[in-house]
Amino acid sequence: MIGGEATKSGPFAHSTNTVQQTMFTVILALSPATLFNLYLFGWPSIFLFGVTIGACVIAEAICLALAGRPVTHTLSDGSAILTGWLLAMTLPPWAPWWIGVLGAVFAIPLAKQAFGGLGQNLFNPAMVARVALLVSFPVVMTAWIAPHPLFSASAPGLADSIAITFGGQVPDGVTAATALGYVKTELSRGIPVFQSLVEYGRGTNLTYTPDLMDLATGYKPGSLGETSAILILIGGLFLMRRRIITWHIPVTVLGTLFLMGTLFNLLDPARFAPGLFHVISGATFLGAFFIATDYVTSPVSEKGQLIFGIGVGLLTWVIRTFAGYPEGMAFAVLLMNSLTPIIDQYTRPRLFGRTRKGEPLPLKGKA
């Protein structure tokens, strides 16, 4: 009651964005990079992309049906499609079909629906699937392919592509190393980082001969989310322009990664890769703009998002530099996801009339 009259609506701020609009805006932002990379890796990547998204949608439908929840209405929010889309962008483009299906099982039933569905999950579902697949099937998940653009002379035909995706018949001599993987492997052989970067740029010991500019433009081995950093960056800036995400997490992720790489590279260029290399290599832009910014698994306050972004950038650099895996973005995001409730606890804004712990402020002058 206000002034003796019953209120008809709560004093809440309203937004025109719905869950469905948000999901499909993110998909729209991902589309240019996705289409370019599907062209770059040909029919096998298109088949795997479709299988992964389809498996996520089917897995979500089964979970909803078993839980007695409305299937069609819930599926229409687009969250299962986006999860499958992001998962597909983290897989080797010519991986077999069962990788996409198994990844969907890890992402939807185990990482999302087991926690109660959209808005309840603690960890990013696509990253849970990515890490589970990488740990369980390291050989398949690190079988990177050199670009074979659609309809080019080196691209497999439709029949060969079906055999690759659904029969696991990858031709010999088409694999190649990612930049991060090549540098880490060469370092383990005693080759200085600055030398391996030059060799990678010249194509030494590779079946594919990239230029280091390809790390930014996209013509390089890697997953759909690792290539074409420029197009992914454009998509991320589009999300910021539409106010789907804010600058806090992307800027701190990129800034921390660049700062750590630059600082240690200055100290020992033979051991540590430069900051710019870390920023434009691997899944840095995809992670910074499209994964770490997930509403559900990242902090809500601006201060919390800054802390979260710094943590993701720092952990990514540490894992890339010292751990056994060349790419650390997925691990970093999951580790920081686990800290999100704690970060929210200590960075949430103080309510008017209460302490930061939620306790009422003492009244002045009262004994």
Image: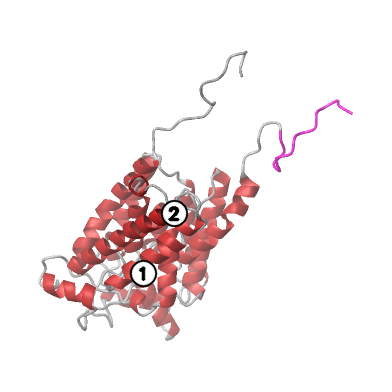
Q: Which residue is drawn at 21% across and 67% down?
A: 41
Q: Whole-percent x and y of residue 316? A: 48, 65
> Which circle marks residue 102 in the picture?
1
Q: Position of residue 60 (x, y in %)?
A: 37, 56
Residue 228 in view (yes/no):
no
- Quadrant for the C terminus in the image: top right
Front-most of 331 and 48?
A: 48
Task: Give the residue at x 71% y 31%.
Answer: 353
Between disc 1 and disc 2, the foreground one is 2
Q: Residues within 10 Å of mark 1 (few under 14, many from 20)?
A: some
Q: Looking at the picture, how far across and down is residue 323, in whole percent?
A: 50, 75
Please indicate whether residue 104 sits to the left or right of residue 5 in the image: left
Q: Which mark is first along the chain, 2 or 1?
A: 2
Q: Which of 20 and 336 is in front in this view?
A: 20
Amino acid type, label 2: Ala
* Quadrant where the N terminus is found in the figure: top right
Q: Bin the neighbour count of mark 2 within 10 Å (Cα to Cα): few under 14, some 14-19, many 20 and up.
A: few
Q: Does residue 190 sit above or below 3 in this rendering?
A: below
Q: Please name the residue that numbered disc 2 is placed on.
A: 67
Q: Is residue 120 above or below residue 278?
A: above
Q: Which amino acid does label 1 sit on?
A: Leu
Q: In this view, does 292 lie to the left or right of 74?
A: right
Cα separation, mark 1 vs mark 2, equals 21 Å
Tell me where residue 126 appears, x and y as whole percent: 40, 61
Q: Is residue 155 left or right of residue 306?
A: left
